[in-house]
Image: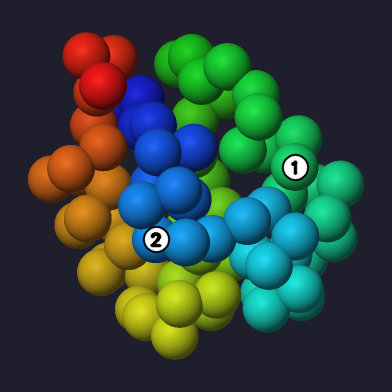
Amino acid sequence: MKFDIKAYLDDNSLTIYRVAKASGYGYTTIHKSFNKTQSDATSLNVRDLDALAKAQHKAMWEVLRDLEKLYFNSDER
């Protein structure tokens, strides 16, 4: 599965810095994760979902639901 994380961040008025600060994960860790090219070997992981959820005060399933509905394989954007 490939998600357009950058579009998700933009649409939700998030920055990598804000996600890192709110989630407690290091900026470098989040930056590397969100800026990598996703492939079958490097997919979005639970840490990334947790970071996004904490930054928005949501549950991880809510973030995943939004990603699946609105940002899945959205190369057309």
Identity, as a three-letter code, of the amino acid under mark 1: His
Q: Nearer the viewer, mark 1 or mark 2?
A: 2
* Secondary structure of the residue carrying numbered label 2: loop
Identity, as a three-letter code, of the amino acid under mark 2: Asn
Q: Position of residue 63 (x, y in %)?
A: 32, 62
State left or right for residue 2 relative to residue 49: left
Q: Residue 15 occupies which quadrant of the picture?
A: bottom right
Quadrant of the image containing the N terminus:
top left
CA distance separating discs 1 and 2: 17 Å
Q: Position of residue 31 (x, y in %)?
A: 75, 42
> How many residues crowd around disc 2 within 10 Å: few (fewer than 14), some, or many (20 or more)?
few
Residue 77 position (above or below residue 15): above
Q: Residue at x 47, y 50 (%)?
A: 9
Q: Position of residue 34 (x, y in %)?
A: 61, 38
Residue 34 position (above or below residue 75): below
Q: Which circle marks residue 12 in the picture? A: 2
* Secondary structure of the residue carrying numbered label 1: helix
Quadrant of the image containing the C terminus:
top left
First-in-chain label (1 vs 2)? 2
Q: Residue 73 occupies which quadrant of the picture?
A: top left
